[in-house]
Image (cartoon, rainbow, N blue to C red):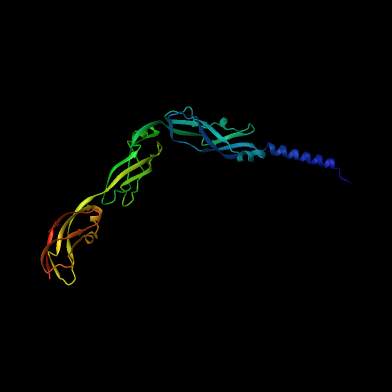
């Protein structure tokens, strides 16, 4: 006996319809995370604390479409048009959740939030240039300034009241520093505030500190061929002025040279002669004692 395909098709359709009636009427609960979007905050107000990025919503609906709701990107639009300075209690309401009527919002966690609101203010403060370390030893800094020398801060009024200046990020100087330093430097912006402009042009000048040193230097004599020379005194006292960084170097005394060069045809006898002092560039001989020495040529 051949099966009647029309009856088989009808039976399949009726079973599918019955399955739909059973599963479609079955309702299930599903937790999902909903992003919170805060809008409409009055101009001039600042939310100090209490802001929330998302809430968990328990939704009840037909089993067959629960997964589609769970996977969708829903947003809870939280209007802040009525907030005022101080504490503001805001309740999450199911009617503000954009869901089809076939679904029911069972619970929202958290059910409310508390916003701490402050009035936003604007203040102009001077800029202070900050160095990570003092100027390198032996150098003096002058003319440090920032352009612009003042900036505009925007933030909570209570916080701005306590701010009298804004500092640059610490500046690291090269060693040795250049005669003129110029760089664009970001500002150290306090939390919860905005600054305009965010960077300033910092310039400063450097010059080597000068100092004096007194030392003893032996007289170096270039003796003519066939002659012996005695010098009195054999060493002289020199007072030298120059950059402090150079004079403080432990090798500096070895860079000072007092020398005496005699003529190749000098005759034996006694003489009084002046000597020459050689020193590093930037140094200056202030005093030499004695300024002349006695020679005995043999």
Q: Is residue 103 above or below residue 261?
A: above
Quadrant of res 32: top right
Q: Residue at x 69, y 37 (%)?
A: 24
**83 or 196: nearer the eye?**
196
Q: Residue furthest right?
A: 1
Q: Measured from the top left, where is residue 233 in percent x and y?
A: 12, 64
Q: Residue at x 53, y 36 (%)?
A: 36
**298 or 106: nearer the eye?**
298
- Viewed as shown, does residue 114 lie left or right of 252? right
Q: Measured from the top left, where is residue 283 in percent x and y?
A: 22, 54
Q: Measured from the top left, where is residue 228 in percent x and y?
A: 15, 71
Q: Is residue 257 above or below residue 170?
A: below
**228 or 124: nearer the eye?**
228
- Viewed as shown, does residue 119 lie left or right of 262? right
Q: Measured from the top left, where is residue 136 in percent x and y?
A: 29, 51
- Viewed as shown, does residue 271 lie left or right of 143? left
Q: Is residue 70 above or below residue 277?
A: above
Q: Residue at x 58, y 35 (%)?
A: 106
């Amino acid at each position: 006996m051949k099966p009647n395909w029309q009856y088989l098709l009808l039976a399949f359709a009726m079973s599918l319809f019955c399955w739909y009636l059973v599963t479609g009427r079955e309702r299930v609960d599903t937790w999902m995370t909903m992003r919170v979007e805060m809008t409409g905050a009055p101009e001039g107000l600042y939310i100090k604390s209490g802001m929330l990025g998302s809430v968990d919503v328990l939704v009840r609906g037909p089993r067959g479409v629960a997964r589609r709701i769970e996977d969708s990107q829903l947003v809870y639009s939280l209007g802040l048009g009525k907030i005022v300075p101080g504490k503001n209690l805001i309740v999450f309401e199911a009617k503000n959740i954009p869901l089809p009527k076939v679904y029911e919002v069972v619970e929202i966690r958290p059910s409310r939030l508390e916003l701490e609101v402050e009035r936003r203010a604007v203040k102009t403060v001077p800029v202070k240039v900050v160095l990570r370390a003092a100027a390198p030893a032996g150098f003096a800094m002058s003319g440090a300034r920032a352009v612009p020398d003042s900036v505009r801060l925007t933030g909570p009024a209570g916080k701005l009241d306590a701010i009298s200046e804004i500092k640059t990020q610490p500046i690291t100087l090269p060693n040795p520093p250049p005669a003129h330093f110029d760089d664009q430097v970001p500002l150290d912006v306090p939390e919860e505030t905005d600054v305009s402009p965010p960077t300033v042009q910092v310039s400063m000048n450097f010059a080597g500190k000068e100092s004096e040193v007194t030392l003893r230097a032996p007289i170096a004599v270039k003796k003519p061929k066939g002659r012996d020379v005695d010098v009195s005194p054999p060493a002289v006292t020199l007072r030298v002025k120059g950059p402090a960084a150079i004079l403080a170097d432990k090798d500096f005394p070895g860079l000072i040279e007092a020398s005496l060069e005699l003529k190749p045809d000098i005759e034996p006898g006694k003489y009084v002669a002046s000597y020459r002092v050689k020193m590093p560039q930037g140094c200056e001989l202030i005093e030499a004692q004695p300024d002349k020495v006695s020679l005995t040529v043999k």
